Structure formats: structure tokens, C-alpha cells
Amino acid sequence: MYLPLLPLCFRQPTTKNNTPSEFQTVKEECLNCIQEALLQGQWQRAAELMISYLETLENTSREKQLAAHEEIWRIGTEILQQHPRSNIDETNHFADRMKNSGVGRYLKVSLEHAFHLLCSGFLDEAYQHLVLAESWRYGEQTAVHEKELKLVQGYRGLLDYYKWLKRKTDLLELDEGSYAESSVQQEMEHLYRQAKGSLKEIIKFPGVWDPFVMCYVDMLEHYEKYEEAKEVLSEYAYNSKYPSNPNAHVFFYHFLKRRGESRKIKISVLQVLHERVPSHELMLEFYSLLKKSKKKRKHKLRLRVIFAVLDYPDWKENVKAWRFLAKQIVEILQNCGKQLDWLKKEWSFRKDWWPAFHFSVYLAKRNWQDNERLACEKLLVAGVLLGKDCKYFKYIMKEHYKAKKRKFKTLKTFIKEHSWVAQRLCA
């Protein structure tokens, strides 16, 4: 009985002895041995141990039985997948037994069974199992497992798409106007309708559905349904019901690029991608698009984009990125310093860590030895941002002085004339 005035410790039921039984101890030891055998690739030993482990299904605890079913399915499938003497009939038999061991697991096991069949190259068998699972109904349980049912349907749609793609390839080898071509086109239409229905349904659920969306869009583009494809990609990228997914914006951008959309629309898509993944490989393309704009705020954003890219280690040795930054810095200085505040703002976020990150003596030696073009681009940036006393600048200038005296004399003069910039940026 619950009595509000009692302390919390008296409201809990008395606990029984939690000492594991001998059966439980042996079961855990057996499971550890199976895991050890799996790690060592001892598939025959793991299979023999699994026969003993099956006794855990006799455990009277409902919770432990459910956990045992999951363990047996996972481990058993792995053994059958890897064992040198296993065959498709044994795999199918084992999967059927596990499907029927509990209503709640039927769709999940069916889907993973199809995955294993695909890994083994049994495409048609996997498709048939998915079709069978798609027709599964079990009273009220059907509604409970609606999402899993849609997932099964979606993967069946992916296989329909794969068949459609294969027939599309076959079509290229047939004579135009022949009976065979007409037959293949009719089959493609049928597969398209099947795949479209399945893929369209699954992407209605909130989630990350990249392969489903791309297959769907590929078919729509093939049949020149461009507006529908654009709507699908736009919804996938901007609808708040979907999780944040940078790939959605990448897909949308590539579609717009293929369709020859305006620079303004492409910039708006890449700007969202920049805010989410500033180090994405499309950022240099974004920079180039911004450079073509005449608006002042776009050029300010351009500087922010290229600085953000170089904040990441993967871009440290990208010559193109450093060349873009060097050229824009020169543009700013040649513009009578009217945009110097932009440079000062971006540098203020980085002046404490960029010198060690990009402009150390160690990097100067490595850049000079491995990639002279990279060292040349970084040289100007280092000289302007840190001044002529920068260690990186001094080392590269010293190494280049004799070999390319004329070329670097101009650069040295430019840095000397703009030595005030470094002082201004640090002020």
C-alpha cells in the first residue's frame, strides 16, 4: 500500500536475492565463449556452442527470453553467413524459425534476412521475402509495426529500382524501334510505378532516407518529371519534420546545377550547407558563385566562407583554397582598405591559433619541400596577416631568395608596403 507520509525507502518492495543462478552463470560463460570464437573466426566452434546456448530459450523469465531470441538471431545469422559449409537452405530455415518465434520480430527479422540474402548474391530470393513480409498482417499488431512495414516496403522499392536501372542499361544495347526495345520499356514502366509507390510512401515518414530519395529522383528525372523531383528534394531539405541532414542540401544543389538553375537559387542552397557544414567540399564552388555576384554582402560572405574552410585540417594543404584567400586579401588591399574591417573581424577569431595551426616553421619546411605552389600562396597570406617578421614568411623568403629572386622581390615589396595591415589587424 502506498502511504504518502512514509519515507521513500519504505515505499519500495523488498528485493529478493539477486545472486545469479548456476544456469545463468553457465549461460553467460557460454555466451562469452561464443563471442571469443566469433572474434577469432572459429565458426565451427561457435556453431557447436550455439547448440548449447539454445537452452536459454527455456528460461521462464519473459524479459530474458526476449533478449535470448535477439542474441540467438544475431549470432546465428553471423555464423551462417561466415561458416564455410553453410548454405542458403539452412539460412532460410533458421530465419523462418526466428520469424515465427514472436510476432513483434517478424518484420525486423524478415528485413535483415533479406539483407543477408543480398550480401550472398540472392537478389530474387531477397525480393520474394520482402514481398512476403510486406503482405504480413496480424490484427492490432499491424498498426504497432507500421513503420517497420513501411521500411520493408521501401527496401522492396529499392530492389524494384535496381531492376529498373538494369533494364535501363539493357535498353541502350537494343535497336531503336525494335520489338525488344518496346518490351523493355513496358517492363521499365511497370517497375517504375512499383518503385515509385514504395519510395514515395517511406519518405513521408520523418527520417534520413538518402538512398530512397536519390533513387526516386533518378527515376523522376528519367521520365522528365522535373517539377516533381524538385518538390521532393526541396521538401527533404527544408521541411522541419525531417532531421537535420546536410546531404539533403547537397542533393538539391546538384539537381539545381543539372537543371541549369540561376546562380541566386544555387547560392541560397549552398549558404544553408555552409552554415551546417562549413568544411564541405562544395564550399570552394560556393566561393566561386559568390565571387560572380556584384553585391557587397556576398563578397563579405565569400571571405567568411574561405576562412571557415581553412579552419579545418582537411583543407590545410589545399592550394586552391589558399589561392582564393590570397587573391581576396589582395583585392581588399587594392580597394584602398575599404573592406579591411571584414578582414579584421575574421582574423580576430583566429589570430590566437592560426599562427601555430598554419604558419609554424615546421609547416614552412614541410610545405616548401612537398608543395612549392602551396608555400607560395600561404606566403602572401602569412605576410599580410602576421607581418614580415612572421617565421613562416621569413623561412620561405629565405629559401626562395636565390632561386627566384626577381619574382619574390615583387612580393617582398608588396608585403613591406602593407606592413601596416598586420598592426591594424591586431589592434
Image (cartoon, grey):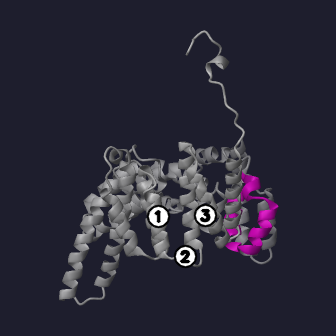
Dots 1 and 2: beta carbons under 8 Å? no
Q: Amino acid under label 3?
A: Ile
Residue shown at 35%/56% (left/top)? 233
Q: Quadrant of residue 54?
A: bottom right
Residue shown at 40%/52% (left/top)? 148
Question: Percent position (x, y) of residue 238?
Answer: 39, 48
Residue 227 visible, this orientation: yes
Please tell me whether mark 3 or mark 2 is closer to you in this view: 3
Q: Is residue 291 magenta?
A: no
Q: Which mark is residue 95?
A: 1
Question: Percent position (x, y) of residue 401?
Answer: 79, 72
The residue wearing badge 3 is: 51
**Marks 3 and 1, the one that precedes in the sequence:** 3
Q: Rounded to the nearest whole Å, what is the CA distance between mark 1 and mark 2?
A: 13 Å
Q: Is 314 placed above or below 4 here?
A: below
Residue shown at 33%/56% (left/top)? 136
Left or right: residue 157 versus residue 7 is: left
Q: Amino acid under label 2?
A: Ser
Question: Percent position (x, y) of residue 305?
Answer: 55, 53
| Segment tinted magenta in the rendering | 354-383
Label 2 Cα neighbours within 10 Å, binned few <14 / some 14-19 / many ≥20: few
The residue wearing badge 2 is: 86
Q: Amino acid under label 1?
A: Ala
Question: Percent position (x, y) of residue 134?
Answer: 33, 59
Q: Rounded to the nearest whole Å, what is the CA distance between mark 3 and mark 1?
A: 16 Å
Instruction: Please identify the quadrant where the C terminus is shown.
Output: top right
Please tell me whether mark 3 or mark 1 is closer to you in this view: 3
